[in-house]
Image (cartoon, grey):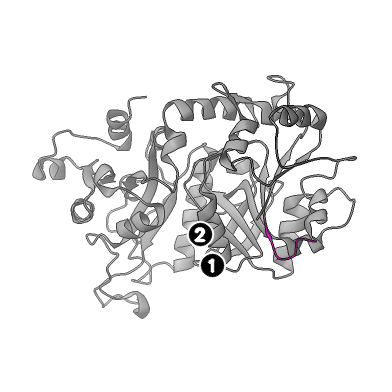
Amino acid sequence: MKIIILAGGKGTRLQKFSKKPKIFLKFGKTRLIDLYLKIFNNKDINFILGNKGKDIKKYLDNKKFKGKVIIEEKPLGTAGYLKNFQKFSTEDVLVIMGDILTKFNIKKFLKFHKKKKSDISLFVHPNNHPYDSDLVDVNANNKVLRFYSKERKKDHVSDNLATAGIYLFKSKIFKLLKKNKKQDLSKNLIQKAIKKNFLVYAYKSAEYVKDVGTPERYFQAIKDIKNKKFNFSNKNKKNVAIFLDRDGVLNKEKKNFRYSNPCNFYPKVFSSLKKINQSKYLSILITNQPAVAKGFITKSYLEYSHKKMQTELGKNNVYLNDIFYCPHHPDKGFKGEIKKFKKNCSCRKPKPGMIFQAQKYYNIDLNKSYFVGNSIDDYKAAKAAGVKPIIVNNLELTKKIKQKKTFANLGSFANSLIKK
């Protein structure tokens, strides 16, 4: 596998803070460039450099770097020089943007890429700034259906699945590029590949990947290292999670109503999620939505409403790591009900099926995780999965299960658990 790090952009967003290339940013005593050398064990890395490339090359020479250093004679954008790697027709090429702080598991990303027989695999994750990130829509098999560049319309609605600046390519894909012409990874390669029906898949991960290209994000990354979030979100280790019920916890629940609007958020939900997002805990939604089985709404409408919810959360700089929902209902007799969803499934709470799905995908230590809900079904599902149940917004149930503390809402629990 070839490894390419693209560095030496102009760094306009950081110029007021630092005149040096972003790859020289320090995290403690270690520079970002040194972290890359450590991750890849100083092997077979190709640095493709633009602005201030000579300064970066000089630094690598002093490190006795064993890979290749290429300084572009003229700016070719994020994709232009990749045309030269087309000749490695049998190899995979890992490309990383040089302003990414990460500690991801390369072997698992490559395994996903090969299993899917993917031409392009995009490392994606939800983030707290989707409005200035490239986003994707995927199907249940994680195949990319649509790619939305950051220049999309302001009223755009989609899942908060942002590309993280890490890509795996079959080198044959570079034939789509033109020689010696300035080109962009998103516009001139990835979107073109999707239109031409190449296989493009999204590798959804909660591993730590952060664009540190702005002062705000850089200082947040320093905090993440101090509070160990940088170490927790890694597929080599077990993660911990706060599982969240939807209606009655995040948004107001309308009793005896066909479907509750997930964007009708309770006060302080954004600040609560921000606290969780900045902690070691993943935030994962676990929700029964029987309105689909009853025929009150379609499955596509449910998924669209979740996209609207994630878009609204993103506008407020917070996110959910993932959403698991159950569209089933066991009882028949509703006018317009959908037969294929009328069944006694293993995912509908109080059964713990959705929690186990999340556990498997995100390698979660259930014994060190929490489930925040407002109903007896939430409580039973948590207990069945071995997760610590937390009831909010339900004083009667709180007393019935003899919960030691009373939590009026998600915020009061988040403040109790996460002190910083």
Which quadrant would the C terminus be assigned to in this image? top left
From where the camera sits, is residue 338 visible? Answer: no
Residue type marked 1: Lys
Q: Nearer the viewer, residue 105 or 390?
A: 105
Select label 1 or label 2 by which is in front: 1
State the extent of the magenta-drawn residues as a range: 87-92
Classify residue 313 as left or right of residue 33: left
Question: Mark 1 = which residue?
Answer: 115
Residue type marked 2: Tyr
Q: Nearer the viewer, residue 105 or 12?
A: 105
Prevalent SS, magenta region? loop
Q: Specify the farthest residue to the bottom.
A: 339
- In the rendered image, residue 111, in percent from the top left (x then y), is placed at 53, 60
90 in magenta = yes
Measured Cα–Cα span from mark 1 to mark 2 = 29 Å
333 in magenta = no
Identify the image quadrant of residue 6. Answer: top right
Which quadrant would the N terminus be assigned to in this image? bottom right
Q: Looking at the image, is 30 positioned above or below residue 38?
A: above
Q: Indicate which disc, 1 or 2, sits on the residue closer to the N terminus.
A: 1
Per the rendering, the mark at residue 304 is 2
| SS class, disc 1 | helix
- In the rendered image, residue 296, in percent from the top left (x then y), is placed at 38, 68
Identify the image quadrant of residue 32. Answer: top right
